[in-house]
Image: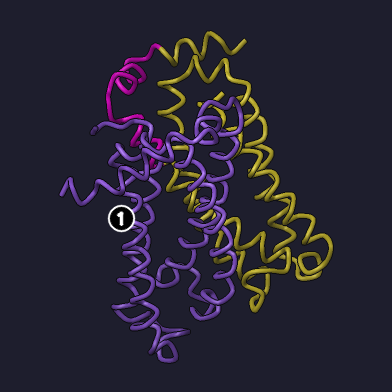
């Protein structure tokens, strides 16, 4: 159903230009990783805190509030650098199971992070108890579920 | 210069001949799995370093005293780094001559050495005055420089890692 869209994306002038350039795609991939580090850092300080580790001298809500900016910066940067990669590689990604796995888990991870996890971090009672630990673990699992297939797209 | 590097090259050539090295590089899944673990651990390490360096730069996480940020995150940074290094060594072990000839590999190695020097210099110089700038104030220039260099160096190291397969300069 989405095949015509992916085929069209593949054939855009911009997509072809990226594909034919020696450096655009590799550099975009590399910068994608820098934003990934920012996202992971912003997520992890909060997830570790929810699990009772890391910045334990601070309340969860404070750690979460401080980190939020970097989660958003990381995510936006990943989308901006992700789109050129998708455009120039549309047909290969279309036929990759790992790409679709990533695309299914990613929206779930985003919604979870900005709803359930956000509410739990803002509630002292929820964040310090079992709920907090569960949410921390789920967050790590979901975002790992995005990161791992991403790397596997090009490999298998 | 080339003669000085001969023992190093011979080491890489020797490992390249090991049965286990060959088996790893010809494996269907094992090398790929080790690479994925390397990247997961790298993202944890780099992510926590970024969080700490943002605090050192006076840009982020300013509500928490720096000494707390450093002390609390350090075990996780070191744990993640250890696993990243172990998996990295295994990856190089699988294809030593491939990496020996790759400029991005050497840039990574040198970059990590410089990053280590940066961390040590910060610890023994700027950190000595930590009680003066731990909370509520902008860290001094030396600390901010260490934070800036940290981000730039690790960003460069991560980018070189991503560029390894492209081997533009032989």
Q: Write down the residue under mark 1.
A: B110
Task: Indicate the position of residue A156 as horizontal and vertical percent values.
Answer: 57, 23
Q: From the viewer's side, name the closer residue of A54 and B158.
A: B158
Task: Indicate the position of residue A59 as horizontal and vertical percent values.
Answer: 67, 74
Task: Tell me what hue chain B is rendered in.
Answer: purple
Tag 1 secondary structure: helix
Task: Tell me what hue chain A is rendered in.
Answer: yellow
Task: Indicate the position of residue A131 as horizontal and vertical percent values.
Answer: 82, 60
Please say if B16 is above or below B107: above
Q: Quadrant of residue A18?
A: top left
Question: In this image, B98 relative to A47: left or right?
Answer: left
Q: In which quarter of the image is residue B133?
A: bottom left
Task: Indicate the position of residue B67 as horizontal and vertical percent values.
Answer: 51, 81
Q: From the viewer's side, name the closer residue of B131 and B104.
A: B104
Q: From the viewer's side, name the closer residue of B170 and B59.
A: B170
Give the magenta part as a residue range: A11-31
Q: How crowded is mark 1: few (under 14 residues within 10 Å), some or many (20 or more)?
A: some
For residue B139: magenta? no
């Amino acid at each position: 159903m989405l095949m015509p869209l992916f085929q069209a994306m593949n054939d855009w002038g911009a997509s072809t230009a990226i594909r034919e350039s020696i450096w655009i795609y590799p550099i975009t991939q590399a910068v994608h990783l820098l934003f990934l580090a920012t996202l992971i850092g912003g997520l992890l300080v909060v997830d570790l805190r929810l699990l009772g580790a890391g910045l334990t001298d601070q309340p969860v809500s404070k750690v979460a509030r401080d980190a939020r900016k970097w989660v958003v910066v990381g995510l936006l940067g990943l989308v901006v650098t992700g789109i050129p990669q998708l455009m120039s590689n549309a047909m290969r990604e279309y036929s990759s199971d790992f790409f679709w796995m990533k695309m299914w888990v990613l929206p779930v991870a985003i919604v979870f992070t900005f709803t359930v996890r956000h509410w739990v971090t803002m509630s002292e009672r929820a964040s310090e108890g079992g709920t907090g630990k569960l949410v921390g673990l789920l967050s790590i699992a979901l975002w790992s579920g995005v990161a791992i297939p991403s790397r596997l797209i090009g490999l298998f | 210069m080339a003669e000085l590097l001969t023992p190093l090259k011979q080491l890489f050539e020797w490992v390249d001949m090991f049965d286990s090295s060959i088996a790893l590089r010809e494996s269907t899944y094992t090398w790929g799995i080790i690479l994925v673990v390397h990247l997961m651990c790298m993202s944890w390490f780099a992510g926590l370093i970024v969080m700490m360096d943002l605090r050192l730069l006076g840009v982020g996480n300013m509500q928490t005293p720096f000494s707390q940020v450093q002390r609390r995150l350090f075990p996780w940074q070191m744990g993640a780094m250890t696993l990243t290094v172990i998996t990295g060594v295994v990856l190089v072990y699988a294809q030593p001559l491939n990496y020996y000839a790759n400029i991005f590999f050497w840039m990574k190695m040198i970059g990590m050495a410089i990053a280590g020097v940066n961390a040590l210099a910060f610890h023994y110089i700027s950190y000595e005055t930590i009680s003066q700038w731990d909370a509520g104030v902008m860290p001094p220039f030396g600390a901010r420089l260490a934070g800036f260099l940290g981000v730039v160096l690790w960003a460069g190291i991560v980018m070189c890692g991503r560029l390894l397969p492209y081997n533009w300069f032989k």
